[in-house]
Image: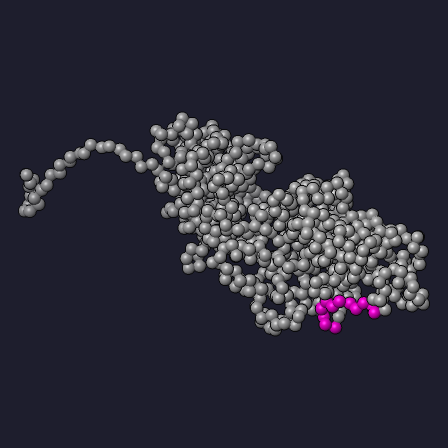
Amino acid sequence: MYEQNLVKTIEPIKKTTISRLNKGKKWKYGYNKEHDIIVISKTGQIGEILEIQNLQIALPKVPGRVLKHELNKWTKLEHPKELSRLKNIFDWRNYPDEQKEQWFDYIDEEFKRRDEGFWFTNNDKPTYLTGTHYMYLQWSKIDVGAPDFREANRLFFIFWEACKADKRCYGMCYLKNRRSGFSFMSSAETVNLATLASDSRYGILSKTGADAKKMFTDKVVPISINYPFFFKPIQDGMDRPKTELAYRVPASKFTRKKITANEKLEDLKGLDTTIDWKNTGDNSYDGEKLALLVHDESGKWERPDNILNNWRVTKTCLRLGSRIVGKCMMGSTSNALDKGGDNFKKLYNASDVTQRNRNGQTKSGLYSLFIPMEWNYEGFIDEHGIPVFDNPSDDVLGPDGELIDIGIIEHWQNEADGLKSDQDALNEFYRQFPKTTEHAFRDEALGSIFNLIKIYEQIDYNEELGRTLGVTQGNFQWVNGIKDTQVMFYPDPKGRFKISWTPPSHLQNKIILKNGIKYPGNEHMGAFGCDSYDISGTVDGIGSKGALHGLTKFSMEDSPANSFFLEYLSRPPTAEIFFEDMLMAIVFYGMPILAENNKPRLLYYLRRRGYRGFSMNRPDKVWNKLSVAEKEVGGIPNSSEDIKQAHAAAIEMYIQDHVGHLRDGEYGSMYFNVTLNDWTRFDITKRTKFDATISSGLAIMACNRHLYAPNAKIERSPVNINFAKYNQSGNTSRIIKN
């Protein structure tokens, strides 16, 4: 049985507290700091609290009366024919006064639903739609006519409403699958907001200017035209404009009171609100003030256009000083990493709601959302809008009345299995229909020097098993804070280390002391590889990360053979913290370390602390061929072409023997996907960009150093040893003389 992890109902607040505050209608729309939830209810009361991608969102309380259609599912509500004939406010004014009154309650209710949202019964379950989602389903026209209700879209709009409600948030960064409806949903939201606000500007960007224009003309404009008269301001200019949709005089921000007041045209105050699009570029909308920026296909910006640079510029369009006055609705599938996908990936990762600064904001200011393909795959959504994950045991019908006889999980796997002989086609399929973020950012196989099939087999295996792999995050510390004693590992979800194995207690902190120098006591079990750095600060404030990897050998001890057991990819505030991290790790495991000596501060740090014996010498030279510095601190150079080739060959060998599907359903035990993904992108001509690859490759070389030992030819004189031979017959032994 498939178990979804996109959304769950949580209870972070006592029911008595909710009940007490509900009674007084005390819950305010927006971020509630006391309870760390985002309230999207505008009624003063909350009910169910959902957690969607680590964002805790409080929905409105279920009302006493919920609309139930005879089909027990979402059905577009019928618009009165009499009103459908009215195209604008002026048609309403000419409508007989004695007939207007019968529609006042209807119009009021539609405005209320637009603002507060809408409840309906779906398969006997009370189901909440945000006001934006209701406007999309009820009043938006898309390419197939009226949109279908989908649970995936409901969660999307709930998440988006939370982004709007949270004053700390600049909007959303949505990683999606193909044909998920984002372009239409964001277009519908643009029109919904623009027809409510005055003196505002709404902008659209896409992967090219032509795409932005097409979104504007084919989606935004038709949605606006098809609004009912009581939601639709009068627009200035053409009915179907090509560049700008302008709600100018005589348009007004409408309420029911406004449209029944029979003001003269000259008395109406215009909205002065516009929707337009811009050509793609780093400085698009630079200097503008925007109420909403729609970023469509943001994962497909190709050089020289850069979504990261553009966001740094356009982010300022959404704020006045520290106050956020506009939002960004960003969504896309991802291109291959070298075709714009890498920048979008960085932006998505920088939008993680669990990683906030002291102002409560993510690094990008956006909130990331990923809805896996199984939630929104056409043909596998039932008539109630619920995805069919597993093979159904009973008849299940889709919205079109067609029978669904297979679950999306099995169908998707069958598709993926059929493409495994063509890695590039498989990667493109994963990007278009991702089950995980790893799939969504899957890179092209072209130009890779390693076996990507095996690497991706391992990545998929790791993703599938997830937490059951036993990888723990944490930090090492000296016992009682006393250096050079015993080291312990402490789990910490924000720790710098990821480990999958620790040695038995009797093998931890195993050190051999020789002539005052400390040597590793578990050298026979494994070794570390390290890509170090020397300087704490960097020019750009980011810099490369320090990297450490631990790898086991085959040994008779209680340890997994040929397994990476530790991954460290971090850049602490100071280089000294990094050095101490490295020292504590090698002491805890009692294993040597092979580090590049072009950045020697780590090696000198180990020597100064008495751990020179832990620092391995380069394996390709005998002792008397080492330089003075190499004899002093150890390490291996990164400038030698032979070393570079040997390093890449070591990783290639390891992948072939120990990564991906091995035999009889067994898989490798390389559980660190960050490193695996680094291998997929490795470019031997640009090694400095790949910290994880450098470090892990050195660990492999360290564990197989005998393969790199020089074949020194030593001239020796022949030695003639004469052994005596004896006759053992009879009772005594007699020497045999020649």
- The one of 81 and 498 positioned closer to us in this rendering: 81
Residue 374, position as x, y percentages in the image:
60, 61
Residue 385, given in percent of the width and then of the height, sits at 67, 65
Residue 283 horizontal/vertical position (percent): 69, 42
Question: Residue, x 52% and y 57% (percent of image)?
Answer: 426
Q: Nearer the viewer, residue 617 or 543?
A: 543
Question: Please, is residue 375 above or below residue 655 in the view?
Answer: below
Q: Position of residue 88 (x, y in %)?
A: 86, 61
| Quadrant of image for the C terminus | top left
Pick the quarter of the image with the N terminus: bottom right
Q: Residue at x 55, y 38 (%)?
A: 545
Q: Is residue 633 left or right of residue 267?
A: left
Residue 133 among magenta residues:
no
- Camera sees residue 671: no
Q: Is residue 146 visible?
A: yes
Give the residue displayed 77% in from the left and 54% down from the top: 241
Instruction: Check if residue 80 falls in the magenta segment.
Output: yes
Q: Quadrant of residue 649?
A: top left
Q: Is residue 148 above or below residue 339?
A: below
SS majority, magenta: loop
**Residue beneath the point at 74% across and 62% down:** 141
Above or below, comparing residue 324 to residue 114 in the picture: above
Instruction: Count how many numbered circles sit on residues in the image.
Output: 0
Q: Which residues are magenta?
A: 70-81
Does 615 appear above or below 33? above
Q: How is the image coloured?
A: one colour
